């Protein structure tokens, strides 16, 4: 089973972060939320692996419970 | 108004049981002549059981209610002698379109698999199904089977005893009592029997209202399922358009929670809504309109000693996915062979507990699917609406998001994984025919497979030796010998063998797989027969 990567994994982290903010630049909050929702779905599909996705959901929710799978 | 709603199908007539000094005892009494009660009665009568159906009404159920019937229930209806008229009259469809706001987001094709006698889905008004079932009851009566429908016979009291059930029945001419060895309660979602026995029915009510209308119109909309999210003619809500025979169209319009139902139902309020949807130039006539709040709930247990609940009385789902009548027919299919074996003393009463186990599993699956569809169609929070709309927007641009769009996951039969009647899987065969699965159909030179499995235990051998007949403790199992040499389409191999050279399947009377192995093994298959009949 693949594990969610929670150590640094993006080459050029500052560039990515700037891209993320650029994409949202000039949007109102509602549009930004919608963009984020679409982004989550696009990325989730790219990952595909349900086990990794569950770990990601937990990690993002700061849910500390042991993964019982 | 369609006259079918007004014509009594099984009018009341005074029967001898009403004058009996001592209550007459029947083998089985079924309460409710809806699709499920009628199907159960036919199944039992075909097995020579003495069965009486009582219903407080005498007509088909009002409005068309169910319209979408799936392949598995059609196969079950084939066994009951009603499949052909359903398919002849019904409208077959496999295309669907999803709209969001003013745009078509995507369309889908159900891509029905080859090699099945019955289509994936047909649309047909529920009253036709009920009519065909009643016609079949009449046919069985003409053959001398002991089956009776008593219209305007309303159960008003029930008494349960260790070896029978007693009923008090109200008729237009007064009340009388009858008794039954077994009672099947098919009295619908508002089951009075459930209330009389004090059993609960827990689950979720969806805080929303749907206007369901059947309209007759001469329009050239194609035979496709059209589903709208947030359309201009019903802002913030959803809508569905689907074709039925006789130029009748089903329209569902979501209305939201805070509405005045009586007001919304009036033609002067319904017609403008429909005009907005269909366009001003389409002529139509209202056949039937109703407003529903949907629920997903079930009884904790379906069997209560000699009273067994089936269909909507046992479980209720929202109609997205067409799982109500479709799953009710599977309840009756699951129950009747078991009840027959128990009544004949060929299986222990505990076999009936597997009905509970298997059909609760089915109900849970249906409730899960239809709750999820309802959550997608009517998002309950701002964030769920945001994700829902995001999925729809993405679906228009990218294929990946389309499987996430949930406008109803249409009914498929459930696999009884983990059922106590299954023997462990001993074949490295296809997953879809593992023990517990409903047998998929296959087209063979001599006809389709499912009708040849019939409604008894069958030993299906594919390129394997086995005795032609096995008797195990009162259960007779006949062999059906097939070979991939007579399988020009290779679908038998694909569905039942996979990469294996040979296979032997033990198939239950409801056409679910009980056991499978690469070759016949007397000891193992006898054990499997005992297990499948509740003896191990
Ligand atoms: C709008 C709508 C759309 C639907 N669409 C679909 C669909 O596309 N596909 C699908 O599979 N399902 C669909 N369903 C669900 C389907 O209609 C039901 O699941 C189905 O009718 C259940 O059948 P039943 O025999 O269990 O109960 P019912 O059809 O409700 O029959 C119960 C019977 O019991 C009788 N009765 C009640 N109390 C007593 C008493 N005390 N004494 C005597 N008789 C009594 C009643 O008169 C009635 O005839 C839909 C439902 C609705 C409302």
Image (tube, rainbow, N blue to C red):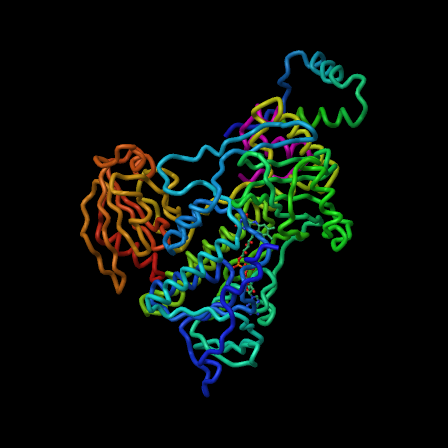
Toward the bottom, the furthest residue is B21
Q: Of residues B278 and B377, which is closer to you in this image?
A: B278
The image shows residue A47, relative to residue B178, as above or below, that is above
Q: Of residues B117 and B364, which is closer to you in this image?
A: B117
What is the quadrant of residue B472 in the picture?
A: bottom left
Q: Quadrant of ligand 1?
A: bottom right
The image shows residue B62, relative to residue B225, as above or below, that is below
Quarter holding the C terminus of chain B?
Answer: bottom left
The image shows residue B265, relative to residue B191, as above or below, that is above
Horizontal and vertical percent position of residue B443: 31, 39
Magenta segment main secondary structure: helix
Q: Of residues B493 and B86, which is closer to you in this image?
A: B86
Q: Of residues B387 and B97, which is closer to you in this image?
A: B97
Answer with left or right where residue B237 lies relative to residue B243: right
Range shown magenta:
A42-69
- Residue for point 37% across, 67% down: B141
- Can see residue B298? yes
- Residue for point 67% across, 26% down: A38
């Amino acid at each position: 089973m693949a594990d969610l990567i929670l150590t640094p994994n993006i080459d050029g982290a500052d560039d990515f972060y700037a891209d993320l903010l650029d994409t949202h630049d000039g949007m109102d909050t509602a549009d930004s939320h919608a963009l984020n929702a679409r982004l989550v779905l696009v990325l989730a599909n790219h990952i595909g692996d349900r086990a990794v996705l569950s770990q990601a959901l937990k990690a993002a929710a700061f849910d500390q419970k042991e993964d019982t799978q | 108004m369609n006259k079918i709603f007004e014509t009594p199908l099984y009018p009341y007539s005074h029967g001898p049981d009403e004058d009996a000094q001592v209550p007459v005892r029947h083998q089985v009494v079924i309460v409710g002549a809806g699709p499920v009660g009628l199907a159960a009665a036919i199944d039992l009568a075909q097995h020579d059981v003495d069965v009486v159906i009582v219903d407080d009404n005498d007509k088909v159920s009002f409005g068309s209610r169910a319209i979408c019937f799936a392949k598995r229930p059609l196969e079950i209806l084939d066994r009951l002698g009603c499949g052909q008229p359903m398919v002849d009259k019904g409208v077959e469809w496999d295309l669907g379109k999803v709209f969001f706001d003013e745009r078509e987001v995507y369309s889908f094709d159900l891509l029905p698999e080859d090699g099945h006698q019955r289509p994936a889905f047909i649309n047909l008004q529920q009253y036709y199904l009920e009519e065909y079932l009643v016609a079949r009851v009449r046919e069985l009566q003409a053959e001398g089977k002991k089956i009776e429908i008593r219209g305007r016979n309303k159960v008003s009291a029930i008494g349960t005893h260790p070896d029978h059930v007693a009923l008090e029945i109200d008729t237009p001419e007064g009340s009388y009592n009858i008794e039954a060895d077994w009672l099947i309660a098919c009295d619908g979602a508002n089951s009075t029997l459930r209330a009389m026995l004090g059993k609960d029915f827990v689950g979720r009510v969806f805080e929303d209202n749907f206007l369901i209308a059947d309209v007759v119109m001469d329009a050239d909309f194609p035979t496709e399922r059209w589903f709208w999210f947030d359309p201009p003619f019903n802002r913030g809500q959803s809508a569905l358009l689907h074709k039925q025979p006789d130029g009748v169209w089903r329209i569902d319009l979501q209305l939201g929670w805070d509405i005045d139902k009586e007001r919304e139902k009036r033609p002067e309020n319904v017609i403008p809504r429909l005009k907005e949807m269909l366009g001003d130039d389409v002529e139509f006539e209202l056949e039937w309109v109703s407003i529903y709040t949907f629920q997903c709930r079930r009884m904790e247990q379906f069997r209560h000693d000699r009273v067994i609940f089936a269909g909507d009385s046992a479980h209720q789902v929202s109609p997205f996915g067409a799982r109500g009548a479709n799953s009710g027919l599977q309840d009756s299919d699951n129950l009747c062979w078991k009840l027959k074996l128990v009544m004949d003393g060929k299986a222990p009463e505990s076999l009936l507990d597997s009905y509970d186990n298997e059909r609760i599993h089915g109900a849970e699956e249906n409730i899960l699917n239809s709750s999820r569809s309802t959550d997608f169609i009517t998002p309950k929070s701002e964030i769920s609406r945001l994700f829902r709309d995001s999925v729809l927007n993405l679906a228009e641009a990218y294929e990946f998001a389309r499987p996430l769009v949930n406008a109803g996951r249409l009914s498929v039969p459930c696999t009884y994984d983990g059922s106590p009647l299954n023997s462990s899987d001993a074949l490295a065969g296809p997953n879809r025919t593992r023990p517990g699965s409903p047998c998929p159909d296959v087209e063979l030179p001599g006809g389709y497979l499912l009708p040849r499995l019939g409604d008894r235990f069958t030993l299906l051998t594919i390129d394997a030796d086995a005795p032609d007949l096995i008797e195990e403790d009162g259960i007779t199992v006949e062999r059906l010998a097939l070979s991939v040499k007579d399988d020009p389409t290779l679908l038998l191999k694909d569905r039942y063998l996979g990469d294996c050279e040979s296979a032997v399947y033990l198939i239950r009377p409801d056409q679910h797989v009980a056991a499978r192995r690469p070759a016949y093994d007397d000891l193992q298959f006898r054990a499997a027969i005992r297990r499948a009949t509740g003896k191990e």
